[in-house]
Image (cartoon, helix red, strand yellow):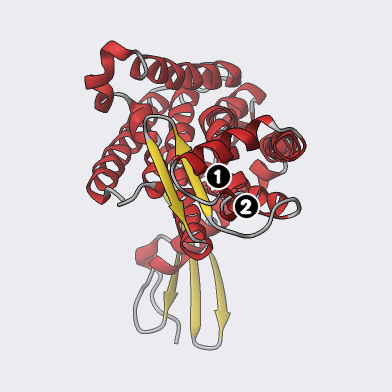
């Protein structure tokens, strides 16, 4: 016996599908579509989860279908191979590293390795190139669709603006994770072609001097990339926030990169040394702490909590601006 559907307002906008004793009811409630499985009661949660997954998959499909999405991956390949070849076939970088190790009582041949070279490449790439390419994608997520006129069509469908922004932000965060993973894997794989698998040596003048055996070095290297993903997501979120305003995609990217670089410049002014904890870039580079001995876990926890606050703030500000924005074709 069919249940009474009069309370659901059955009409032309409702379709009923019978499959055994299960009845699926599709109806439009305002701006949201719901699916109820009537089998002793109404349940609407499952369909929303499935729809969220499908919408996220659609955002990822659109993101990775763009050619500019792969610029970062290609530039990482190029930059890492150039650095490896210069390090391998010139005497300057190796001689300086050997001099530093032997001057501190270590056998240099135990630490001129694939892990050391891969970490050596991280410093310039993570400081300069990684923020650029995540900002490039984050600045495109909303502004590009508004510029192309497709955002107006998307918002004509039964999806809220907040839900759409959350889906786009998640797609950008997933891209950031992939980009950081590619940076780490490319470095180790290509460095292994030219250097043996031995211990890890990390040296930043005035800040860091650490040596690890091959096993623990690999663990520190992987953990550093997990924290680097937090940096990538934060910069992407900053560009995403600017993208929610009525600006061009290039403007959103430039604003985000400018904000990061201004923080970096001010942090490195000697007279501002005591104020470095107030700058975003200080907390973005917490991945370096994973190479310290011992690891300052309290600093990492503090910076991670601050980065979470930055990400939430960026998302809230962007959502507020996008909510009141008049989308014109």
Image quadrant in which the N terminus is located: bottom left
**Nearer to me, 82 or 23:** 82
**Nearer to me, 27 or 75:** 75
> What is the x, y in percent for residue 306?
27, 37
- Residue shown at 29%/46% (left/top)? 300
Question: Against 46, is 52 above or below?
Answer: above
> What is the x, y in percent for residue 125?
58, 33
Q: Earlier in the sequence, mark 2 or mark 1?
A: 2
Residue 110 shows in this picture:
yes
Q: Are marks 2 and 1 in contact (CB under 8 Å)?
A: no
4 with respect to 159 (left or right): left
Q: How far, Cα to Cα, is label 2 from label 1?
A: 10 Å
Question: Against 191, is 257 above or below?
Answer: above
**Secondary element type, mark 1:** helix
Q: Which of the two marks, 2 or 1, is nearer to us in this view?
A: 2
Q: Dot 1 corresponds to which residue?
A: 119
Residue 113's disc is 2
Image quadrant in which the C terminus is located: top right
């Amino acid at each position: 016996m069919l249940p009474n559907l009069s309370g659901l307002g059955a009409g032309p906008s409702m379709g009923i599908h019978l499959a055994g004793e299960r009845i699926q009811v599709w109806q439009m409630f305002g701006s949201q579509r719901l699916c109820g499985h009537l089998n002793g009661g109404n349940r609407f949660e499952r369909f929303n989860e499935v729809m969220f997954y499908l919408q996220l998959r659609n955002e990822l499909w659109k993101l990775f279908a763009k050619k500019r999405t792969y610029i970062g991956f290609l530039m990482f390949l190029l930059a890492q191979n150039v650095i490896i070849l210069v390090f391998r076939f010139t005497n300057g970088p190796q001689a300086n590293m050997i001099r530093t190790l032997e001057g501190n009582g270590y056998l240099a041949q135990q630490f001129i390795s694939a892990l050391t070279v891969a970490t050596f490449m991280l410093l310039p790439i993570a400081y300069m190139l990684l923020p650029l390419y995540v900002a490039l994608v984050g600045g495109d997520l909303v502004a590009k669709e508004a510029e192309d006129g497709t955002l107006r069509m998307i918002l004509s469908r039964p999806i809220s603006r907040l839900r759409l922004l959350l889906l786009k932000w998640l797609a950008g965060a997933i891209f950031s994770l992939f980009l950081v993973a590619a940076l780490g894997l490319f470095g180790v794989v290509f460095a292994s072609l030219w250097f043996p698998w031995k211990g890890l040596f990390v040296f930043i003048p005035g800040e860091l001097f650490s040596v690890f055996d091959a096993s623990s070095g690999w663990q520190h290297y992987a953990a550093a990339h997990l924290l680097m993903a937090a940096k990538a997501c934060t910069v992407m979120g900053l560009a995403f926030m600017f993208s929610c305003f009525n600006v061009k995609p290039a403007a959103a990217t430039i604003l985000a990169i400018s904000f990061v670089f201004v923080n970096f410049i001010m942090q490195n002014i000697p007279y501002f040394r005591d104020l470095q904890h107030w700058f975003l870039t200080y907390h973005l580079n917490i991945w370096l702490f994973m190479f310290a001995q011992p690891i300052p876990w309290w600093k990492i926890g503090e910076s991670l909590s601050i980065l979470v606050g930055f990400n939430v703030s960026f998302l809230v500000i962007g959502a507020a601006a996008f909510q009141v924005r008049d989308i014109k074709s």
